[in-house]
Amino acid sequence: MAKRLELKSRLQGETLVRKGMLKKRKLQDQIRIAPDINILKIGGHGVIDYGREVMHPLCAEIGALSKKNKMLVVTGGGGRVRHIMDIGIDLGMPTGVLAELAAKISEQNAIMVSILLSEYNGTRIHTGDLLELPMLLKLGILPVTHGTPPYGLYEHPARHEMIPPHRTDTGAFLMAEVLGAKSCIIGKNVDGLYTEDPFKNPDAELIRDITVKELIKMNLPDMVLEPMVVNLLQESVHIREVRITNCHTRGNIEKAINGKNPGTIIRAE
């Protein structure tokens, strides 16, 4: 019987799933590809769908901020995603197909936002271009991309749910984590995370600062943020907090970039 060929490495013979596999060796610090960049996600439903009345002054604000701060603008999908999801679910489309369909909408929004930001060097990039960001930022480009995570047809279905669990909030968070970004800011049409939907209950309480454990324990029936972001934040390496702010209020984004809390901060611990 021929002798098995083994390539010498510190993981030789490992299954890569054994618990405690890496405890005996020192973990290397991960490289932060773009540690000075601020990831700003602007929602489709909460921001872009409001049209020129909101988007024109918002883009002027973002453009001005980009002159002094490195930024990556990430777009959500919005109302058109809800429309295609409704049709797809009615037709019995698998979760992975729904994810593919939804991705096209946030991509359309990325194109429109990049054009609105063109006078500030706004340029639409694809998610595969993330490794080019250090060079693009040095050239003075304001990159814009869509927030749909790259799972596509491989998006795993939830047990009792058809809607893809990884959507554009999640995509923005994953980009920030991979890039080792300075911050992850999620722009919405409300002042932050509330105990209930403030549009349905005006007396809902604004949660200013909360940890992941505290938030999970509250078991809120509805959140302004995708639950998957909360789950990922528990195990994150670089991004240990997420800021939620109202993009309709001028000055909030600048406050968030400067480390202030213009809405809600969700902390890993």
Image: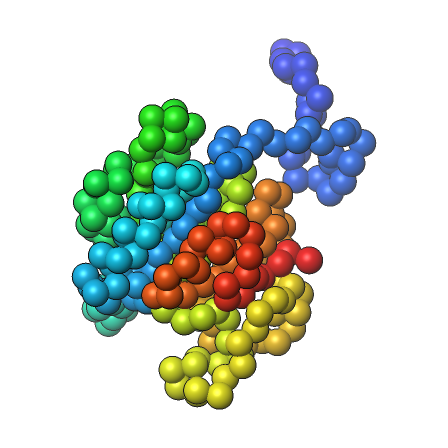
Q: Could you say where residue 125 lies in the image, as x and y percent from the top left?
A: 29, 37
Residue 96: tell me if it is visible: no
Residue 107 versus residue 5 in the image, above or below: below
Q: Could you say where residue 237 lies in the image, as x and y percent from the top left?
A: 62, 43
* Residue for point 21% across, 40% down: 119
Q: Quarter of the image holding residue 145? A: top left
Q: Could you say where residue 268 lies in the image, as x and y percent from the top left?
A: 64, 56
Residue 25 versus residue 176 in the image, above or below: above
Residue 36 versus residue 170 in the image, above or below: above
Figure quadrant of the C terminus: bottom right
Q: Nearer the viewer, residue 89 or 266?
A: 266
Q: Quarter of the image holding residue 163? A: bottom left
Residue 239: tell me if it is visible: yes
Figure quadrant of the N terminus: top right
> Quick check: 87 left or right of 71?
left
* Residue for point 34% across, 65% down: 248
Q: Nearer the viewer, residue 242 or 237?
A: 242
Q: Quarter of the image holding residue 12? A: top right
Q: Nearer the viewer, residue 43 or 61?
A: 61
* Residue for point 47% across, 39% down: 37
